[in-house]
Image: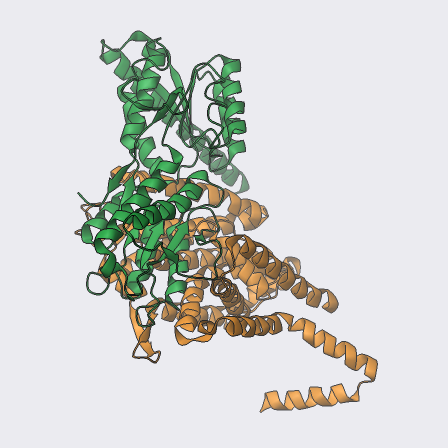
Chain colours: A orange, B green
Amino acid sequence: MKAIANMKQSMAEFKAMDAKDKRSKVIDTLLNNAIYILLVIFVIFTATRNANFIKISSIVNIISLAASSLPIALGIGGCIVLTGTDLSAGRVVGLTAAISAAMLQASDWANKMFDTLPEMPIPVVILAVIAVGGVIGLVNGFFVAKFSLHPFIVTLATQLIVYGLILEFYMLNGNNGQPISGLSDKFKNFVTGTMFSIPAGNGQSVAVPWYVLYAIILVIVMWFIWNKTTFGKNMFAVGSNPEAANVSGVNVFMTTVMVHTLAGCMYGIEGFIESARISSNTAGTGLNYECDAIAACVIGGVSFVGGTGKISGIVLGVFLLRIIFVALNMLSISGNTQYIIKGLIILVACSIDMRKYLVKK
Amino acid sequence: MKKALALALAAVMAFGLVACGSTSSSSTAASTATSTSTASTPAAASDVNAAVFYYNYSDTYISSVRTALDAKLEAAGIKYTDYDGNNNQTTQNEQIDTAISSGANLLIVNMVTSGSSDTATSIAEKAKAAGIPVIFFNRAVEEDGNEGAVLSAFEDIAFVGTDAPEAGHMQGKMIGNYLIENYETVDLNGDGVIQYAMFMGDASNVEAIYRTQYGVEDCDAVLAENGKPALEYFDAGNANKYQLDMNGAWSAQAAQEYMQTNLSQYSEANGNMIELIICNNDNMAEGCITALQAAGYNDGKGTTIPVFGVDATDSAKALIADGYMTGTIKQDADGMAGCITALASNVAAGEDLLANTDSYTKDEANGLDNKIFIAYQEYTGE
């Protein structure tokens, strides 16, 4: 009801404007929502060229692809709100994926990495990867907060360190850099097993994997943390102006450390999911994941200016990138062109976002 | 508090430096130990200080070469230091300069920029200036049709690797023969043509380019000999006829995401299922199998789509044993490491770099005595 009242009011305001104001108001609204408008046009265009794009199996595919890259984006979003970034994210995903895989290999797999290790209970593994991710995040946060280093530098350093650890890990116990696969069915079913099936007509059904549910849970948890907790409010305060936050009694040090730690925990969960989803883990797993995650956040309006951003924006950004990926494939566009299109979309989306911000200033 | 922290940081750094130092000195110590304990080892062996440059530690196949080569060099009593080029030619060139200035007297190089004679020439010139031999391995040093541009232009130079197009040729033939034997089973929709998908690891790598090309061409040749129509790419709109890992990482993740997306429009029930999958390497093949299994294929119960890779990694072998994957091409990591060690031992013994190498296959077509090929092998299970 309130929304309708608001709309009525803004319509009334709009009518009261003179012609020139009206025009600029329309242009503003269009530009501010350009990303949504472009998305709708893009979806309609793709659907007319390839009707399969909007069929149920394709939609489920997009949703599950988006779900798989949500945890890392949700984590990295917090770092961007603090005007920072996190370059170590992808490698942390790689390390935690390797750990999950090694702990959950089927006991009868021929090339089991730790052959004496019994199959671990899944909750133990989840806690372990969250802890590993959290510790790396803690280190990131500590150095950022304690020495006022830019997160770019700190996370660049940890990225290298973590990559070294990954390479060492794959060499352990005579594994000699071979992929870690042969995961136990229990693990695979827990992550990629069928949560429920949607009938897609012609007697087929499309399976929705469990990790979609996990992504939804994480979105809800993160939404709660960002919007309903003191910690979340402090994060935005520190992001928009650390001095002001400090003067108003916010513990800037703790907040920064906590944001990075939380991000690390999310990478741990991402690693756990990716490990089962890809099910063949190599030292290259997780490479460049942070790029897509950062792009998704920024497209979704989590600004590098700091202090602004919404969980819904991150979800939208992740979906946008995945829709582009699927659509370009369904349009049979070559890999070379895909780079260009993806780059242009990121550039346009971010320019529109910054424009909004510049106008406000 | 601050001082304590600074002290702790300094301690960590010092520890890091010591730790780095100790790894290299321990390998040196170990090799000296072997050379002194085995009196039969020629005394010269301990004088050789080999520097081994890998293009990227995270590459599965290269990791198995590294493990094998480390062990064999150690056994031969040759001192060595490993370097990780981290997929960056500039990094590798700098490492080579550093190694030469720190006293390396044998270079063993796995170039980052595969198939570039310019890069190879600049490395060979560094070696020549320092008066030391150089052994290239694994990745091609010359463009196709430009054979001898590097290898015949320098003294004390050798190449140990694979004939880049061979894996593609072999994969294509293996697929062709498999199809001839199982044509009816593979042709799910019974239209007489096999619809295939191709996954490419890296757009700028000659091995990937050859595998993508010959994997299909040679298969078509076998099919044509047997009166069958050529393969047909499953997506008529895709002019490239492959799907590419955009990170150039030959990764399972890229293949899995492409395949999952493909499977959302192509399925057995729709009568347009992809009937054959060809991958540039085994990681990508594994990614495809993961996507297939999630959609109810290749799980031992329903339809099995034949999937082919290259490398014969341990996990691919296990998948083949379980019947989820059909075949791969084995790159012989052990054989390559053995050949490199033989050349390095020649240097250590003060003999000609290429002494006693007549048993190896060489590039006779171009008359290059110093280009040694380690053969690929088909692998379809033990």
Q: Quadrant of residue A192?
A: bottom left
Tell me what residue is drawn at x 39 percent, y 53 percent. Answer: B198
Seen from the viewer's position, the closer of residues A83 and B312 is B312
Residue B170 seen from this side: yes
Query: Depth check: B37 or B363 in front?
Result: B363
Residue B171, percent from left and from top? 32, 44
Residue A239's x, y, as percent? 60, 60
Q: Going by the image, does B21 lie left or right of B1?
A: left
The answer to whether residue A276 is seen in the rendering is: no
Question: Does residue A21 sit above or below B203 in this rendering?
Answer: below
Where is residue A325 drawn, in percent x and y?
A: 49, 62
Q: In this view, does A41 lie to the left or right of A330?
A: right
Which of A262/A14 is in front? A14
Nearer to the camera, B120 or B69:
B120
Q: Which residue is drawn at 50% across and 39% down?
A: B4
Image quadrant occupied by the N terminus of chain A: bottom right
Residue B124 vs A264, above or below: the answer is: above
Asked whether, in this view, residue B353 is left or right of residue A25, the answer is left
Q: Quadrant of the C terminus of chain A?
A: bottom right
